[in-house]
Image (cartoon, grey):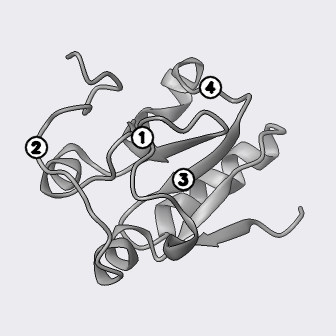
Amino acid sequence: MDEIETVAVTDLPDDFSGVTDRVLLDVRENYEWEDAHIRGALHIPLDEVPARIDEIDLEPELMIVCRTSGRSFRLSQYLAMRGIEATVVRGGMVAWQAADKPYDTGTEGMYGSVDS
């Protein structure tokens, strides 16, 4: 298997709301999302991804974020076995917050739609 690609949080936009060439998938649990999340990210907890894979637009570049990268690497390996490429956000939300990048809190966007 090829090596999994990673990206530094400092190389990412602060807000993914209007980004069309990349999808940021947040695979953390609901309580983690409520505490802090990147605006415009798609939230699907890791355990739900296989059943909800059709909710993810796989046409643009797929980027995965979790708390520190562990879950992101596991999901990237799973996806790679299915022929889907993904990039891991190195250091996850811990690195995002350490870099003083902006984040939202609460439940908005939790179920994949800001209208929920």
Q: Is residue 58 above or below residue 85?
A: above
- Give the distance between the C-alpha atoms of the residues marked 3 and 2, in whole angstroms: 20 Å
Q: Quadrant of the C terminus?
A: top left
Disc 3 target residue: 64
Marks 2 and 1 close (CB-CB < 8 Å): no
Name the disc covering residue 8, or none. Answer: none
Q: CA distance from mark 3 to mark 1?
A: 14 Å
Name the front one of labels 2 and 1: 2
Asked if 20 appears above or below 89 in the picture, the reply is above
Measured in 3D between alpha carbons, the distance from the residue under mark 1 to the one under mark 4, in whole angstroms, is: 18 Å
User: Circle 4 is placed at which residue position?
Assistant: 57
Label 2 or label 1, whichever comes before in sequence order: 1
In primary-sequence order, the first of circles 3 and 2 is: 3
- Residue type, numbered disc 3: Ile
Crowd tier of the residue under label 3, counting other residues whose Cα lies within 10 Å: few below 14, some 14–19, many 20 or above: many
Residue 29, given in percent of the width and then of the height, sits at 27, 48
Q: Which mark is residue 106?
A: 2
The residues tagged by marks 2 and 1 sit, at their Cα atoms, a distance apart of 21 Å
The part of the image, by quadrant, that contains residue 40 is top left
The reply, left or right, for residue 26 in relation to residue 75 is left
Q: Residues within 10 Å of mark 1 (few under 14, many from 20)?
A: few
Mark 1 falls on what kind of element?
A: helix
Q: Earlier in the sequence, mark 3 or mark 1?
A: 1
Report the quarter where the N terminus lies: bottom right
The kind of residue tagged 4 is Asp
Comes first in the chain, label 4 or label 2: 4
Which element carries disc 2, helix, strand or loop? loop
Question: What is the CA distance from the residue labelled 4 to the residue labelled 2?
Answer: 24 Å
Residue at (43% x, 69% y) in the render:
92
Q: Amino acid at mark 1?
A: Asp
Q: State the SS at label 3.
A: strand
